[in-house]
Amino acid sequence: MRQFVVFLAFLVSFTGAAPADSLYVKYKLYAVGLPIGSGVLNLGLSKDSYTLSGSGETSAFGRLVSDGKGTVKVKGGIGDGRFTPESYNFKMTSSDDSGKISMKMNGGKIDEVSVNPPQDRMKQRVKVTQDHLTDVLDPLSAAVLPAPKGLNPESCNRTLQLFDGKERYNVHLSYKKRDTAKTADGRFNGKVLVCGARYEPVAGHRRNRKSIEELAANKSLELWLAPVGKSGYLFPLKASIKVPFGALVVEAEKFKFSK
């Protein structure tokens, strides 16, 4: 389940020059309708650079979700409407898994990775090669999608190649429908794009691990994408996945966008 939480990036201030556009979103995490976590996402956009940061926490829910807190910060450049991350820093503390990950990136290529504590059971894991570390995004940068055509079905149909410092995986997005949605505070109320999503492990994961196989086979994951003003980017307003006990849902409740 860690891959799902990291990809959704609700475990998400700014540094550098003031952004031309800024987005603030507060999320709630629900399990079978019960609130078990919250998080904040901050995005800053300027002409040729971006920053992403956030923080979040979860409460224990059986064996599937543990008590935990996390922070993540990313900054990078923008070229041809695409994010090119330069630095990624992730910190998580929970009852069963704690640590820090930092990466330096250049042009979609991973230059440096630091993982503390180091991964265990390396002989059981699919080896991450240098080829796996080219043309990739970190999970948080991937949460904000360039979409020059806006809420067009083509904005869904893509594959995200991700590396989180430990594991390399793909997320395949596909168009499902258009819909309307609003946040609890009423500040966002409009059209959204609903995409199906499928997780594909590539490297860094343990072979034949049941949780990985179940996540890869799960076809219920959906992302509801909303426009970041008129910037040409989409952000996740909502995400959901069905699991054996019910459903996990991350949903925006507060929204603020300013130019």
Image (cartoon, rainbow, N blue to C red):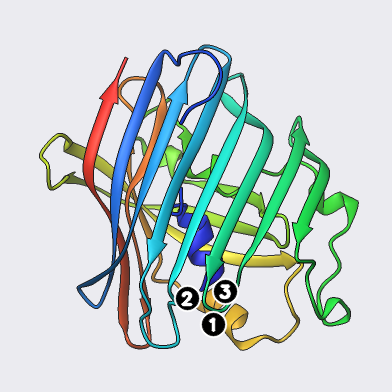
Q: Are marks 2 and 3 in contact (CB under 8 Å)?
A: yes
- Marks 1 and 3, Cα distance to the nearest angstrom? 5 Å
Quadrant for residue 219, please give it. bottom left
Residue, disc 1: 214
Which residue shows up at 45% across the image and 25% down it?
Answer: 44
Quadrant for residue 232, please give it. top left
Asked if residue 168 lies left or right of residue 111, the reply is left
Instruction: Locate the C terminus and report the quarter of the image it occupies.
Output: top left
- Where disc 1 sits, the SS reads helix
- Toward the viewer: 157 or 28? 28
Q: Are marks 1 and 3 in contact (CB under 8 Å)?
A: yes
Q: Mark 3 is on which residue type?
A: Ala
Asked if residue 218 lies left or right of residue 78, the reply is left
Label 2 Cα neighbours within 10 Å, binned few <14 / some 14-19 / many ≥20: some
Q: Mark 2 is on which residue type?
A: Asn
Residue 227, can we see it?
Answer: no
Residue, disc 3: 216
Which residue shows up at 50% across the image and 35% down it?
Answer: 52
Residue 224, can we see it?
Answer: yes
- Marks 1 and 2, Cα distance to the nearest angstrom? 6 Å
- Marks 2 and 3, Cα distance to the nearest angstrom? 6 Å
Which residue shows up at 55% across the image and 56% down it?
Answer: 172
- Where disc 2 sits, the SS reads loop
Q: Are marks 1 and 2 in contact (CB under 8 Å)?
A: yes
Residue, disc 2: 218
- Toward the viewer: 47 or 59? 59
